[in-house]
Image: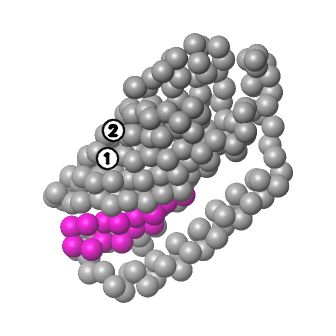
Amino acid sequence: MYSLDAIDTQASRIPGERLKRISMAFAVLTFVLIGWSSAAWSQSRESATETRPSVWAGGGLSGYTVQYGERKMWGATAFVDADSAYHIGIEGEGHWLEYHQTANVHLETYMIGPRFHVTVGRFQPFVKGTIGFGNFNFPYNYAYGRYLVIGAGGGVDYSLSHRWRVRVADVQYQDWPQFTFGAMNNVGISSGIQYRIF
């Protein structure tokens, strides 16, 4: 059994080799997104409103397969997209997986990172890379830990109007490299609706 002190101590360790690989992956992702943006810009015809910077906020539901005990959990999600006029932006997101719990195991993640999108008619496919932290509640409230979380994913939004979009699907892979019992990987999908603030 692990005590809370053991979990907190282990969660605070930073494995050097793994972080080097993660940093390299983020650098490659950024260069790919920047390189792809010029090609995508020439292929899509956009309206005047789509060529201006914008901020969207939204929420919905998420369903995840959590590697710890192979649990299937679901919960709420919230996200904010800040997009530039050149298809590249930033997404911040939170997931609260509180439902379908067994033994009171639940978790939440808070992440941010670059996002790249193109517009094809009313559809807007996107890819993203995120980094942040996750809170994990162990069985029967035995302990609670906070861990580094790295994510990669993509999906598609569908425009209903100038102000409203549906997030049809947002698929995300999460790596918890410092998890107490060894690296943990979770996979999930989210859907929801979003509103353009400006």
Residue assigned mark 2: 61
The magenta span reads 115-129
- Name the image quarter holding the N terminus: top right
Residue at horizontal 59 percent and vertical 28 percent from the top: 136
Q: Does the magenta stretch include residue 53?
A: no
Main SS of residues in magenta: strand
Residue at horizontal 38 percent and vertical 40 percent from the top: 62
- SS for tag 1? strand
Tell me which amino acid carries mark 1.
Ser
Residue 183 placement, left or right of 193: right
Q: Position of residue 77 (x, y in %)?
A: 39, 38
Residue 1 placement, left or right of 198: right
Circle 1: is it few (<14), some (14-19), or many (20+) Cα within 10 Å?
Answer: many
Q: Position of residue 161 (x, y in %)?
A: 16, 58
Q: Where is residue 94 in the image (x, y as percent from the top left)?
A: 46, 38
Tell me which amino acid carries mark 2.
Leu
Occupied quadrant, residue 84:
bottom left
Residue assigned mark 1: 191
Q: Does the magenta stretch include residue 126?
A: yes
Residue at horizontal 29 percent and vertical 59 percent from the top: 157
Judge whether residue 63 can be spotted in this image.
yes
